[in-house]
Image (cartoon, rainbow, N blue to C red):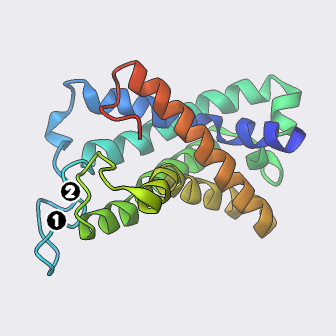
Amino acid sequence: MEKLAEMYITLLPIILAGVMNMVWCKIKVCDFLKKPIDFGKNFPDGKRIFGDNKTFKGFVGMIFLGIIFSLLWGFISENNTFIYEHNYFYRNYESSPVYNILTGALSGFAYALFELPNSFMKRRLDITPGKNDVKGLKKIFFIFFDQADSVFGCVLVVCVFCPLPIWYYFVYVIVGALTHIVFNMLLYFCHLRKNMF
């Protein structure tokens, strides 16, 4: 149970950044960044590289919000011994604004970057962007992978600053993916997501 608490304590800033990035992408601010990361280009197979849903606005939003929430969480952690001692980012390094900006930026970057291979694969399989319009085992795989892709990246960032055993890395990813699914359901019911999965 303590390990689970440590996982959430460590990843809370990026979890909140992910939720707020959904809001950020919906509001009519900085819409000049709403350009697709693939610039609307096709892969040699004639299909889009990533699709319209992967935009510079979402990418920049994740990095910026990762920084903001990491700074806030760092400030809270410095004033709460329990949180500080159970945050993997502070096992080998002390909290400071520069350090929290670094971990926040890297976590946000990894979150956004690790979503791209999934989008690339889905375009190759003709899965509609933002939807999971497949059936059977493929649907189950993509429901999980849609939630796990960004977690793979975020946990990798944690491992850079505090090496974890490989088995724990994958436990982190599974629990993170399940958490992501729950948050997506909440965002769907709050009308911040078009689809639940």
Q: Are marks 1 and 2 in contact (CB under 8 Å)?
A: yes
Residue positioned 27% across, 51% down in the render? 54
- Find the distance from the CA under tag 1 to the CA under tag 2: 6 Å
Q: Please, what is the three-letter code of the amino acid marked with disc 1? A: Arg
Identify the residue at horizontal 14%, vertical 81% (top origin).
44
Count residues near mark 2 (Cα–Cα under 10 Å), then give few for <14, some for 14-19, many for 20+. many
SS for callout 2: loop
| Residue pointed to by mark 1 | 48
Rendering coords of residue 132 (x, y %): 34, 49
Q: Nearer the viewer, residue 111 or 196?
A: 196
Residue 103 placement (x, y as % from top left): 60, 49
Q: Secondary structure at mark 1?
A: loop
The image shows residue 102 at horizontal and vertical percentages of 57, 50
Where 98 falls versus 168 (above or below)?
A: above
> Where the N terminus falls, by quadrant?
top right
Residue 124 pos. (x, y %): 25, 70
The correct choice, above or below, for 11 with respect to 92 in the image is above
Can you see residue 194? yes
